[in-house]
Amino acid sequence: MAALCFVSTFVACNDYETYGEKKEKERDAISQFINDSSIVVISEAQFHAQGDSTDVSKNEFVYLNNNGVYMQIVHKGCGEPIPDGKSTTLIMRFYELNIMDNTQVTNDNSPYDPDFIIVSRSGSTYTASYTTTSLMYQTYSSASVSSGVMAAFPYVNVGRPRSADDQISKVRLIVPHSQGHSVASSYVYPYYYEITFQKTIDL
C-alpha cells in the first residue's frame, strides 16, 4: 500500500508543469508557427532602417525586443498617428488564433459589429480599453486592451479612407503570454492576430 501511494504521488508530481516548462512550450510553439508560416524575422534596427516598415512580399515580421512581440505592418494606414494628449475611439476588426490549441475568435465576418476601443496617448505611453459591446470584452470579460495589441499603435495611422486608394491600417502580430490578455497570461498561451484599426471620425 505504501509503495502504491508513493507511485501515485510520483505520477502526480510528474503531471505538474512548472511555469518554466510552460514557457518552453510556448517558445517552441511560436518557433514552429514562424517556421510553418514561412515568416522572415528582422531586427528592430533593420525595421527602423526600412522606415519602420516590414516587407510583406517577403513575409517580414519585426521582433520587438522590449516586449517579445513579432509584428508585421501590412498597411501603415491613411490619416495620422493616434494623437498625443487626447482620447481617441478606434474601430477594430480582428482575427485571433491561439497558437497552442488553434482556438479562434474573430469579428472580421461581422462588418456591422466591430469592436470599439478607447485609446489615450501620453507621449510614447498608450492605454486602451474595449467598450462593453466589443467581442473581446464579451469573450474575456475584461475591458483591458493587451499590451501586445497596443504594440502596433506607435507605428500606424488611424484615419479614415478619403479616396479609393486610401487603406486603413492593418497589422499582424504574434503576442507572447506576457503581453496578452488574461487567458494568455493565465495559461501561458501565445496568440496570433490580424487586426485593422481606423478612427470613428476624421482626424
Image: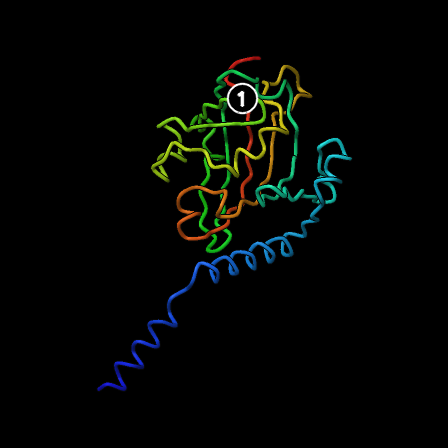
Q: Can you give x and y, in whole percent of width and height, for residue 84 in the image?
A: 56, 18
Numbered circles on residues, count: 1
Q: Which quadrant: the C terminus?
A: top right
Q: For residue 138, which quarter of the picture?
A: top left
Q: Is residue 67 above or below residue 124?
A: below
Residue projecting furthest to the right:
49
Q: Residue at x 71, y 32 (%)?
A: 52
Image coords of residue 80 (percent x, y)? 63, 18
On screen, residue 26 versus residue 113, left or right, reads right
Q: Secondary structure at mark 1?
A: strand
The kind of residue on which mark 1 rests is Ser
Say which quarter of the image contains residue 79: top right
x and y, in percent, of residue 72 in the image: 64, 39
Q: Residue at x 63, y 52 (%)?
A: 37
Residue 164 shown left or right of residue 121 in the figure: right
Q: Dot 1 corresponds to which residue? A: 122
Q: Quadrant of residue 133?
A: top left
> Compared to 57, does 15 lie above or below?
below
Quadrant where the N terminus is found in the figure: bottom left
Q: Residue at x 71, y 44 (%)?
A: 43
Position of 99 with respect to 182 (left or right) is right
Q: Nearer the viewer, residue 67 or 61?
A: 67
Q: Position of residue 75 (x, y in %)?
A: 66, 30
